[in-house]
Image (tube, rainbow, N blue to C red):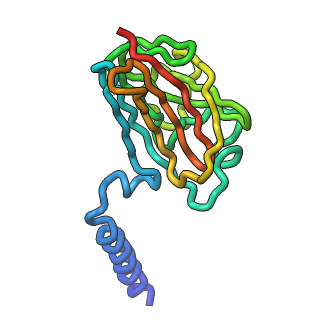
Amino acid sequence: MKRLALPIAAVGRAALLMAVLVLSVGRPAHAQRFTSPPAAVSTTIAGKKISIDYYAPSMHGRPIMGSLVPFDRVWCTGANYATEITSEAPLEMGDLKLPKGSYSIWTIPTAKDWTLIINKQTGQFHLNYDESRDFGRTKMNVKMLSSPVETFRIELRPDGPNSSKGTLALLWEKTEASIPFTVLR
C-alpha cells in the first residue's frame, strides 16, 4: 500500500503544477505577480515631458483613507513599488525646487491635510522608505470628491496650452490631494 502512496502523491503534485501553468498562460507577467496593476501618466508642459509610473490599487469594497492607507504615516502613494516621477526640466512644487531627473513620491495623509514627500531614491519596494534620502516635503491641497474613485489614479493637469504651470493630483476613494507645480527654465 505504501508503494502506491508515493506515485499518487507525485501525480498529485504534477497535476497541481500543470494546473498552475495552464491558468497562468496568456496572463501578463505583472498580472501574475500583482493585484495592483502598473499605471502611468505623462504630459508635456513648456516643451518638457513629465511622467509618473505607479501601481494602481483598487478599493474592492474596503475603506481606504484612515484604514488601508493609515493617517499620520508615510504611504508609498500607490502599491508594490514606489511611485516614480521623472521630469525633463526642473520643477517647483510648493516649497521644493527639484532639479530635472527622477524621484520617488511618498505622502503622509491625515484626516485634514497631506504632505508630499519627494525622495531621491527610486525603484524601492513600497515598504522600503528611507527618510534620509528625502529631497524635501511640502503641503498638498485636499478636497473631498462627490463620488468615489474605485482605482487609485494620478493625474498631471496642464494649466493651458501655453502655460508653464500644472497640477499633480492623487485621487482615491473620496479624496483628492493635489499640488500645483511650475516647469522652470
Please identify the residue farthest to the bottom as the structure is shown: 1
Residue 117: percent from the left, percent from the top? 56, 24
* Residue drawn where x is 40% and y is 53% of the image: 33
173 vs 12, left or right, is: right
**Relative side of 141 to 185, left or right:** right
The residue under the point 53% across, 32% down is 128
Q: Nearer the viewer, residue 89 or 144?
A: 144
| Quadrant of the frame with the N terminus | bottom left
Residue 70, by quadrant, is top right
Which of 4/77 is in front? Answer: 77
42 vs 79: above or below: above
Residue drawn at 43 percent across, 39 percent down: 54
The residue depicted at 48 percent of the width and 11 percent of the height is: 97
In the rendered image of this protein, does residue 64 appear above or below residue 105? Answer: below
Q: Quadrant of the C terminus?
A: top left
Residue 168 percent location from the top left of the image: 48, 30
Residue 142 lies, in percent from the top left, at 64, 34
Is 33 or 150 nearer to us in this picture?
A: 150
Locate residue 25, reporting x and y percent.
Answer: 27, 66
* Front one among 120 and 182: 182
Residue 134 falls in image quadrant: top right
Q: Is residue 137 left or right of residue 90?
A: right
Residue projecting furthest to the top? 185
Residue 184 position by quadrant: top left
Q: Is residue 48 left or right of residue 38?
A: left
